[in-house]
Image (tube, rainbow, N blue to C red):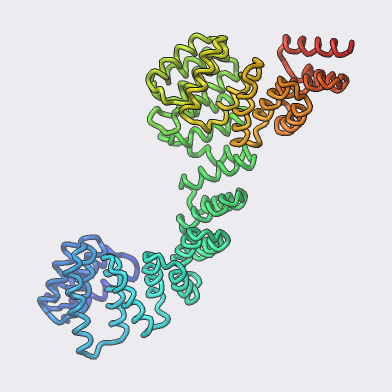
Amino acid sequence: MSKSSLQYTLMGEYAFHQGNFDEAKTFFSLAAKANPSSAYLQLRWALELARAGDLPEAKKSALQSLDLDPKYWEGKFFLAKLYALEQKFEESITLFDEILDQMQASDTEAQDLIDVKFSLSSVFIDMGQLQKSQLLLESILEEDPEHIFAYYYLGRVYAEQLRFQKALEAYRQTVAIDPSFSASWKAIGFIEQYLGNKNKSLEAFKQASLASPADIEVHRHLMDEYLQRNEIEKAAQVAEQMIQKYPDLSVFRVRLGLFYYQLGKLEQSRETLLPLAKDPYALGDHLYYLAVVENALGDYEAAVKHLKRVEATSDSFENAVIARAMILHHLKKDKKSQKVLVKAHREKPKATAITLALSSLYLKTNQINKSKTLLERAVAQNENDEGIWFALAETYEKSGNFSAQETSLKKVLALNGNHAYALNYLGYTYAERGIKLGEAEKLILRALELEPQDAYIQDSLAWVYYQKQEYQKAMQLLEQAMQGAPNEPIIIEHYAQALTKMKQHEKARDYYQKLVDMVEDAHAKQKFRQKIKELSTM
């Protein structure tokens, strides 16, 4: 090697070890040009070209090294790996076979032979020839029982063969050799998760997070493990750790903001999510989440401001429009609320959620005909939308059209026989009118099978029994319903009526008084006061 090529080589090695790969590539290029007959320097330059992503030039340089020395096995080895990267597997295998034959015929160091076998096993995995890879890896482990990567790749082979226990054994061998080998902890976590071993998968992801405290994927899975156990505090702690490392990484910031929201830490949730909203190109999802928090904090102006920024192309657009309209309705700005929904409906006429929100607002503001027209048009365009039929039933009820209401609910049940709320609604409609009580009972019992803890369905069944004059059964169900919805006026009123029928007048008066204190509507207050007055004479 000439003096200049040696100097460039040493400078290249120094730059490489300092992490200055561009400089290293330059120096090895100069070294190869200074000594064009050196197979080693041509290969060394090829390595730096490959590192820089210039595979075509790397291949040229590697081929040149073999032209200079056809028996240069290191050049063949590099070229074989390049062919594998290009998925030219036949050319790759041919070179690997040549290398192995050459090594076996000469006095090759054992570690070099192991390295070649290991790379070949990786090629076999890429080719899907798992049995060949397995045999090679097992032979490597016979020669080197501490070869951590051989165990790791063997675990991969077993996992792809669905031999999960063998895969776990191989992966656990790697972490026995090196407890900080996070790739194996991750693999163990995924397999244990797949096998349903929740505690073992959690422990594996914990170990992976300790081994790789900056690994984003590991910490995302660790968060998910805690979420599956509903351990929100611990999931939040993981997100907090990652935000400290990656303050600009939105995936953890969003999750942490939502965790704080779930934990009732609204101020912390807002502080966590606010930086995302400062981005002029903030994602609609992020703006929507922040608006939900602002709304919970009672800052309606801020919530509306964020919701207005959600663009129509965002997946959160429908939710944002509906939330904005609901806030405006809450603020008694119904004209603005209606304007928001009408505009959104024009932009997205097939968005069922927006249609239903607009129809609901029409009903709340006593615009029954507008609701009816809107929903009838919608159902004409999509007669298989059970949500629209259900809303149409509510609209027909408001307009006093019982026949159309009944037809709409039957249409819902024709589309979905397990629609618990349609079953309940139709059954309660019959019970309220005192008709078809046997059918009403069957409908509501089916609804209760589907939603056994629903207080409103329990109330409906109680009302069937009330209409059948089975007052004791009605009272038992109403007491159960009041446990689930202790402040629901209609359930309390039904209970007071059942108490009256059971001649428990004093107790009935107490519940009517509770209703007087609870409701805001003046007409309803007067009705309940009249009931108290009537009971006082009994």
Picture coordinates of residue 504, whole percent (x, y): 86, 22
Q: Quadrant of residue 134?
A: bottom left
Q: Quadrant of the C terminus?
A: top right
For this orientation, the residue located farthest to the left is: 67
Q: Is residue 363 visible?
A: yes
Q: Residue at x 13, y 67 (%)?
A: 60
The image shows a total of numbered marks equal to 0
Picture coordinates of residue 519, whole percent (x, y): 73, 18
Please state if 184 lies on the left or on the right of 203 as rendered. left
Q: Quadrant of the N terminus?
A: bottom left
Residue 202 vertical position relative to residue 354 in the rendered view, above or below? below
Q: Residue at x 36, y 69 (%)?
A: 157
Please state if 314 lies on the left or on the right of 402 as rendered. left
For this orientation, the residue located farthest to the bottom is: 107
Picture coordinates of residue 479, whole percent (x, y): 76, 30
Q: Which of the pair 374/453 is nearer the observer? A: 453
Q: Which of the pair 126/52 is nearer the observer? A: 126
Q: Which of the pair 159/34 is nearer the observer? A: 159
Please state if 93 lies on the left or on the right of 146 as rendered. left
Picture coordinates of residue 313, whole percent (x, y): 38, 30
Q: Is residue 14 visible?
A: no
Q: Which of the pair 379/202 is nearer the observer? A: 379
Residue 225 vertical position relative to residue 444 in the rendered view, above or below? below
Q: Residue at x 22, y 72 (%)?
A: 78
